[in-house]
Amino acid sequence: MTFTTNTINERIYLKPAYVPNSLVSVLILVTLCVSIYCGFITKQLPDFSAYTTVLLLILSLAINIVITPKNFSVGFLTSLLPYLIGWRIGAMLNIPLIMYVAPFALVAFIGQFIDCIHNDWVHCKDDGWFGNMQWQMTLVRIYFGFNWTGHFTEKLFAGTGSFHHLEQVFFNYGLTGNTAFFVILGGLVELAIAIGVGMGFLSRLAGFGGLAYVLVANYFGGHFFNGYTWNSKPNGGWEYILLLVIFFGSFIMSGSGKFSIDRWLISRGWMPKLLLPLCLTQAGQELYSAKK
């Protein structure tokens, strides 16, 4: 099976067969309406968090309606992340209505993803075991990448109360000068990791960035001085940190696979050649060049 044939199959079958996209759109819209109500009518969402929540959910809905039907992998990934951020804001600020409503759309997102995997397995059997391994990697990659949502949201999107709390946390870690700058910088790096790893964009670079950030952040967090076991002390040891280092480091070796922004750009010839090493290993680049 050639690279071109694989690309054609991906365009045809790399999407759900049974879970309609309209269902996800309706559930995102319901969450958006609830967020507007909580943010601007009952005023439960403080200061700028009302605007960030609503704008992010509008972005998620727009992507889901416009992009997802044309290219499922790109639309799914770029619609899911802003949706998760909006939900996370509501959960952080303990807004019950958002917390109760938002999970329904997530269930629909997950249903679409499982449906897409099944559709790919049924129609792309030539990928065999390698195809199964790609999906395993994709599932883990998306989870670990989007897991950073909880961290960058509290730094960038959840309002001044959350931001000032993080300033105090960073101050206690020893960053006593330009503390606000480091909070924002940390949030931006975490957001970049979520995009790079979770969405699979410049994924080898994102893997290196994630590895470096985890080491630096947890040096200041003090986990390396608390022993190995994660729950050995209130601040935790370096067990979980090592897990993250190994995970992010693995993407320096592999790249992100077919359910990614990288694959979408590369398969259409839109990824600049200069950036290919940040997405693909040497073997991957050689395969791409031979089959292009």
Image: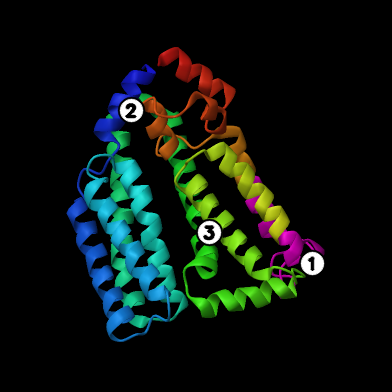
Which residue, given by chain and number where applicable, does mark 2 sit on?
A: 125
Is residue 3 found left or right of 232 in the rendered image?
left
Q: For the point 40% across and 62% down, which residue is it?
A: 84
Q: Nearer the viewer, mark 3 or mark 2?
A: 3
State whether residue 223 appears in this view: no
Which residue, given by chain and number where applicable, does mark 3 sit on?
A: 148
- Secondary structure under badge 3? loop
C-alpha gap between disc 3 and disc 2: 33 Å
Q: For the point 26% across and 63% down, which residue is it?
A: 28
Circle 1: residue type:
Asn
C-alpha gap between disc 3 and disc 1: 23 Å
Q: For the point 51% across and 46% down, which residue is it?
A: 197
Question: Label 3 neighbourhood size at 10 Å, few (<14), some (14-19), many (20+)?
Answer: many
Circle 2: residue type:
Lys
Circle 3: residue type:
Trp
C-alpha gap between disc 2 and disc 1: 48 Å
Q: Which of 268 and 87 lies nearest the eye of the viewer?
A: 268
Is residue 81 found inside the magenta-colored segment of the image?
no
Q: Give the extent of the magenta segment.
A: 218-246
- Secondary structure under badge 1? loop
Which quarter of the picture shows residue 12?
A: top left
Which residue, given by chain and number where applicable, does mark 1 sit on?
A: 226
Q: Which of 144 and 44 lies nearest the eye of the viewer?
A: 44
Is residue 32 found left or right of 275 in the rendered image?
left
Sequence order check, earlier mark of 2 and 1: 2
Is residue 182 found left or right of 192 in the rendered image?
right
Is residue 230 found inside the magenta-colored segment of the image?
yes
Q: Which of 199 and 170 lies nearest the eye of the viewer?
A: 170
Q: Which mark is residue 139?
A: none
- Secondary structure under badge 2? helix
Q: Nearer the viewer, mark 2 or mark 1?
A: 1
